[in-house]
Image (tube, rainbow, N blue to C red):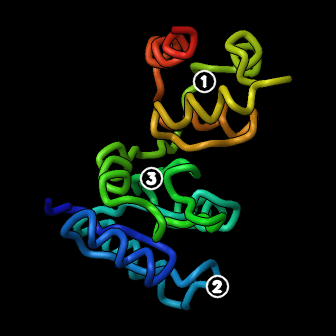
């Protein structure tokens, strides 16, 4: 399968893993100590073909994703759950199966610049997405909505920024009970 957008990954091992999953162009960040011209290259790529950011599901990966999203507008974000990117305790895209990488890329979403206010903290409480026992619930919902994991505050932002509808959230939450 050929992907139109250019995929942004952290390192060379990630390139090999993504190449096993699909035919695409890739840009390597080299971690979060970016080379001087990286954002210029990313902006040009975004303008010409579009970008999908696929970073490791860990602290460093999320930090890289946030920096790219802050500096390059309109990129899509693809998320892999930690359990699908972990091998022998090592977390990274390079550990994921090709079909899991492809699914993450197919579910990539744009972060909207003007975030909606569909959900607020009261909704997080109502849906059990904050407080005791909520971590697993957020993990499940984040995986099923393809928006990744976050603490309560981050997760609330993701629900609004990724334009998730109340109906879609409730549909996913209902599947937990079944």
Task: Report which residue position mark 2 lands on.
Answer: 33
Q: Is residue 110 left or right of residue 1?
A: right
Residue at left 51%, top 40%?
A: 147
Residue at left 75%, top 21%?
A: 121
Residue at left 27%, top 63%?
A: 21
Mark toward the viewer: 1 or 3: 3
- CA neighbours of label 1 inside 10 A, class few (<14), some (14 to 19), many (20+): few
- Of callouts 1 and 2, which one flags the residue occurring earlier in the amino acid sequence? 2
Q: Is residue 77 above or below residue 165?
A: below
Q: Is residue 163 left or right of residue 97?
A: right
Q: Is residue 4 left or right of residue 14?
A: left
Label 1 and label 3: CA atoms lie apart by 20 Å
Q: Secondary structure at mark 2?
A: loop
Mark toward the viewer: 1 or 2: 2
Q: Secondary structure at mark 3?
A: strand
Label 1 and label 2: CA atoms lie apart by 34 Å
Q: Position of residue 130 (x, y in %)?
A: 78, 24
- Of callouts 3 and 2, which one flags the residue occurring earlier in the amino acid sequence? 2
Image quarter of the N terminus? bottom left
Indicate which disc residue 77 carries. 3
* Residues under numbered marks 3 and 2 in contact, where contact means CB atoms less than 8 Å apart: no
Q: Is residue 17 left or right of residue 140?
A: left
Label 3 and label 2: CA atoms lie apart by 20 Å
Decide which of 134, 6 is in the foreground and name it: 134
Indicate which disc residue 117 carries. 1
- CA neighbours of label 3 inside 10 A, class few (<14), some (14 to 19), many (20+): many
């Amino acid at each position: 399968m050929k992907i139109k957008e250019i995929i942004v990954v952290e390192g060379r091992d990630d390139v090999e893993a993504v190449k096993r999953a699909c035919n695409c162009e890739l840009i390597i960040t080299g971690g979060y100590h970016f080379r001087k011209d990286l954002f210029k290259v990313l902006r040009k790529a975004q303008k010409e073909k579009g970008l999908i950011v696929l970073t490791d599901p860990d602290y460093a990966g999320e930090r890289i994703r946030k920096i790219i999203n802050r500096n390059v507008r309109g990129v899509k974000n693809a998320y892999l759950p930690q359990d699908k990117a972990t091998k022998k305790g090592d977390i990274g895209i390079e550990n994921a199966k090709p079909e899991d990488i492809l699914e993450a890329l197919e579910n990539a979403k744009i972060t909207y610049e003007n975030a909606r206010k569909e959900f607020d903290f009261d909704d997080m409480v109502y849906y059990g997405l904050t407080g005791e026992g909520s971590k697993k619930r957020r993990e499940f919902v984040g995986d099923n909505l393809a928006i990744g994991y976050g603490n309560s505050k981050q997760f609330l932002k993701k629900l609004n920024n990724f334009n998730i509808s109340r109906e879609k959230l409730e549909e996913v939450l209902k599947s937990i009970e079944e």
